Image (cartoon, rainbow, N blue to C red):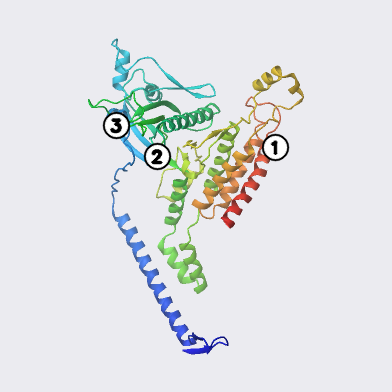
Amino acid sequence: MARYCTARGNKCIVKPSIAECKSKEKYLLSVVRKIYILTSITATAKTMVMSSSSTTITEPKAWYGPPPPPELTDNAASLELLSQGAEARVWLATIDISGAISKADGSTSSSSGGSKRSVHVGSGINVPQLSSLTQHPSPLSDESSSSSSSSQSVKVIVKERFPKKYRHPALDVSLTKSRTKGEARSLIRCKRAEVACPKVLAIANWSNLKDSDGNVNKKSETTKAGNVSTTSSCLFIEHVQGCTVRQYFEQRLESTATQDSPSSKRQRLEEGDDSNILQFKQQQDRVTTVIDSHTLCVAYNIGALVGKMHAAGVVHGDLTTSNIMIQNPPPPTNDITNQETEERSWEADLVLIDFGLATSTNSTIVTAAAAAAASNNDASNNSKKPHKQQHSAEEKAVDLYVLERAFLSTHPESEPLVEEVLKGYREFFEGLGSNNDGCTEGTYGHVAKAIFNRLEQVRLRGRKRECFG
């Protein structure tokens, strides 16, 4: 040890020698090397266990919070929890409608109600109201008849907004109902504009409690104490099969990793020098996103689909790769040549899901009929071009920024995919005026330009928040 005395107060500072520093550095390097070996051993052990097990056993997810409505648990043939958040639970329900169809065909009437009731969700849109899963005629029977005439059961997605204990019961009932109506309204507006999204089947407001006789308490919306709401608002929508875009990108990464055989890896390591070996190991440790013609095509279609949704006047609010599904994912094959030939003719069929945070804005597309009606109502607007109409660029720019951040945070090194998404978005608006879809003459390129200008401002705000908190 070497002691150095300072000029102030004769305080001594102990500084280690060079030999001691080198010994400590060697010790730290040995510790880091041991940790790296242990982590690699555990990772290989996990992969060996996963590859050795031929069958995987998936346990059902456990829900938390208030119990689901007895009307749903008692009358559904099967009920599987797909996901649950702080706001809602998503169920995959298999509903047997054979009894409802037979009762509807017969002459007897039931007390469950045969008249079709509807719920007004705003903008002149009505949604069928479901009082019971056993009612007839049931709005869910239309879904089964459209899918297959011989099936007596139907699979639907039930999004249940359960009551919250921390909210006032009157406020809780109002919020759950209004948010369910808002999601249904956004889905129906997208469906009318031919945007790929699930079909809305019905809305139900059911109680979570039973009375002393074991029957569902349909009258009271709060408990006897009056401090907790007991009403769950359920939205029945179409079940979309397939995988999410996030799962597809991860499968592409796994398929490209398996194509690199161990013999080719060993040959490259033996032929290369030390620098090539280190570079190869760094590439193997880094997780990247596959960038090829197929993933770029998927990204381009995502941009065109989001542009079509924004043109319909709907802002999603939660655009991520987990909320965009592919209905026709390519089947996994071991043969590389067959996989390339199948994917060469494959085109992704994308569907937007989870409109829980969606909001409505002014529609961007102005049809010829709407322009004629506007000109008849107000003669002063004849000099204005119909495509120059007011639109909300701020909300749409924030929607694109959320999608951009979701790509960059979930999929590393996916900048080319983000550029392809924005390219598809811009070209969709630029091609609106030239398509023969009943739109008025003119281009909508200025709409995308205004949204991209606002997107730059949103990016600057996001960078400022990241730098200064």
Q: In this rendering, is residue 97 above or below 183? A: above
Mark in the foreground, 3 or 1? 3
Q: Which residue is mark 1?
A: 446
**Near-viewer residue (63 or 136):** 63
Provide the secondary structure element on which disc 1 rests: helix
Q: Amino acid at mark 3?
A: Thr
Q: Residue at x 49, y 44 (%)?
A: 321
Label 3 crowding class (10 Å Cα cut-off): few <14, some 14-19, many 20+?
Answer: few
**Residue 43 screen position, x and y as percent:** 36, 62
**Residues at marks 3 and 1 touching, judged by CB atoms closer than 8 Å:** no
Q: Which residue is mark 2?
A: 166
Mark in the foreground, 1 or 2? 2
Q: Earlier in the sequence, mark 3 or mark 1?
A: 3
Q: Which residue is mark 3?
A: 73
Identify the mark at residue 133; answer none if there is no mark: none
Q: Earlier in the sequence, mark 3 or mark 2?
A: 3
Q: Amino acid at mark 2?
A: Tyr
